[in-house]
Amino acid sequence: MKAINAQITVAPQIRPEDLATIAQQGYRSVICNRPDGEGADQPSFEEIETAAKKLGLEARYLPIVAGKVRDEDATAFGELMNSLPKPVLAYCRTGTRSTTLWSLSEAGSQPLADILAQTRAAGYDMAGVVRRIANGGRTPTETAEDARFDVVIVGGGAAGISVASSLLARKSDLEIAIIDPADVHYYQPGWTMVGGGVFQASDTAKTMGSLIPKGVHWIKSAVAAFEPKDNAVILDGCRVVKYGRLVVCPGLKLDWHKVEGLVETLGKNGVTSNYRYDMAPYTWQLVQETKTGRALFTQPPMPIKCAGAPQKAMYLSADYWVRTGRLGNINIQFMNAGGVLFGVKDYVPALMDYVNRYGIDLNFFHNLVAIDGPAKKAVFEVKEPEKDLRRIEVDFDMIHVTPPQTAPDFIRVSPLADAAGWVDVDQATLRHKTYDNIWSLGDVMNAPNAKTAAAARKQAPVVAENIVSDINGHSATVQYDGYGSCPLTVEHGKIILAEFGYGGTLLPSLPRWLVDGTKPTRTAWLLKERILPPVYWRAMLRGKEWMAKPEKVTAA
C-alpha cells in the first residue's frame, strides 16, 4: 500500500483476508477500481465488501477497464472521496488505475506539479496523466521522454515470455520490452491437475520477475490503446511506448459476468471452476465431499482456452468417485453449448468409452446463462438445430463452470482486431494482415487453432524467426501449421494425448509405438505429470525450443 497523502492510499489487488490489517491500520473506506473477473486469481468485489462490512469499513465498487479512465469516472471517484469516511484505500490490479483516477479528480483543485510530486512519491509516475490534463484530455503526443524499443511484447504469459526468449536466442542485441502488470505468472495447464488432487496450486505459480528473460525490460503496466500508425502503445497513465516491431499476446478475458449470478456464488454453494487459480483447490474439495446427487460440468460456446479442460475436470472427478465407490450415487451431466464431444473426430471414440464407463449424460447445445448458488439451480439456454430456443432449469449439488471467453476489451476496440474482436493475423506467418511490423500469437489472435499452451510453444519460435528475418530485410522464412495439444485426463494415470493442426490434421510429436494419441496411455500421463511442467518452466520460457524448432520454408 502506497500513501499519496493523508486521505488516500492506493494498492494493488487486495484479498478478503487483508481487510483486518487494513482496518487495524486506521483505514475507514475501501474503493475497488478493478472489474470483477479481470484476473485468474482475483477475488470478487462481493467477497471484499462482505469482509469489509464485518470490520465496519465502507466499501464501494467503481470498476474501470484498464486504460479506459474517462473524465466522468474521475468525477465519480472525486465524489466518493468527498463522501466516504477517511482515510480511503483504493485498489485495482497494480494501483495505477486508482492513482490515475485520483490524479484526474484533483485537476483544478491543486497545481499539476503537486499532483505529479505526490504520485511520484507514492511510486506511480503520472506524467502522462498530467500531460493529458494539460492537453485538454486528448491522447498524449510523443515526447523525448517516451520509451523506445526494437521489439515491444504486450503480455507476459506463456506466449510473451517464450517469444522474448526465442528472439534473444536468435539476436541477442535486440532491445526488447515486455508490458504486463501482473506480479505472478501461472502455469495454467496445471490447474486441471490441482482440481483433480494431483498438483498443489502453489506448484503452478512463480513470480513474474523471476521469469522475465535477462536483458528484457519489464514495463509493469496495463495497455490502454494501440496507435499502430505511429508505432506506439499507450499505457495506463497515458505513457507512450514506441516500437520498431510489436508482438501482441495478452491472452484472453474470462467473462464471468456473462453468466448471471456466477460471480456472487463462485467458490461456495458447490460452484467452482478450474479456470481460476484460487478455485481449483475448491474443485478438489468438492469432488472429495460429494457422495450423492447431481454433478454438472459446463462448456460455453467456442472459442475457449484449452477446449478439453471442461471434460478433463469431469473425467478426473468421475474417476475419483469410481475409486471411492460413489459413482453409482452420483449423476454426472455434461452441459455443452456445442454440438460435438470433441472437435477432432479421431479422439471421440476413446472419449465415448469413458463417457459410457462413467455413465455421463451428454447434453449438447446447452449453454449456461444463469446460476442461483444458494438454491443450487442452473439455467441453460437450449438452442438445438431447427428448434426454437428454450430455457431449462437444472438442480445440482456440485457444478464446475467454464466461463465464456473473449478477447480483452483493449484488444476488441483496437485497430488490430477483426470484426469478432480477435487480432487479425495471417494463420501461417502470424503477421498482422494490415500492419507489417506487428505479429500476434497465443490465445488472442484469430488463427483457427486450439488455444493451448502447447500451441504457444510452437508459435513463439515461428514469430521470433520471422521477426528476425524481417529485421534482416527478408520475407517470412517459417510457418505455423496450427499445432495444438490437449492432454485429456480421462482417469488418474491415463491420458488421451490429442495433438492436431489446422483442419483437424493429426500431428503426433512422438512415435505411435510410444504414445498412440487416440488411445489412453500411462506414458501420456507421465508426460503431463512429470515432463511437461519442467519443460514449460526450464525450456519453453527460456527459449530452448525442445521439439518446437520451426522448419524453414523453401520457395517453390
Image: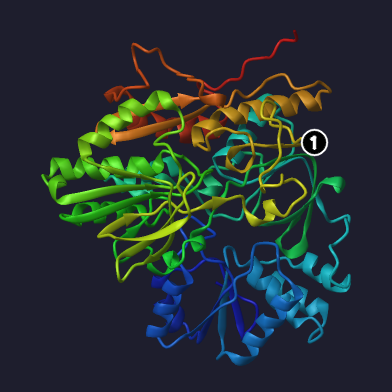
Residue 226 in the image: state x and y as whole percent. 77, 51
Residue at 58 percent of width and 76 percent of height: 90
The answer to whether residue 519 is left or right of residue 359 is right
**In which quadrant will I find the N terminus?**
bottom right
Image coloring type: rainbow
Q: Residue extending furthest top?
A: 556
Quadrant of res 531: top left
Residue 452 to residue 477: above or below: below
Residue 337 in the image: state x and y as whole percent. 45, 47
Q: In this figure, what is the number of numbered marks?
A: 1
Residue 11 to residue 192: above or below: below
Q: Residues within 10 Å of mark 1 (few under 14, many from 20)?
A: some
Of residues 356 and 524, the one drawn nearer to the viewer in this rendering: 356
The answer to whether residue 390 is left or right of residue 133 is left
The answer to whether residue 391 is left or right of residue 522 is right
Quadrant of res 15: bottom left
Residue 478 in the image: state x and y as whole percent. 68, 20
Residue 357 showing in the rendered view: yes
From the image, tell me which residue sits under label 1: 437
Residue 239 in the image: state x and y as whole percent. 77, 59
Residue 102 to residue 500: above or below: below
Residue at 38 percent of width and 26 percent of height: 347
Residue 427 to residue 399: above or below: above
Quadrant of res 95: bottom right
Of residues 41 and 70, the one drawn nearer to the viewer in this rendering: 70
The answer to whether residue 4 is left or right of residue 349 is right
Q: Residue extending furthest left?
A: 325
The amino acid at mark 1 is Asn
Of residues 527 and 207, the one drawn nearer to the viewer in this rendering: 527
**In which quadrant will I find the C terminus?**
top right
Residue 491 showing in the rendered view: no
Which element type, helix, strand or loop, lies under badge 1? loop
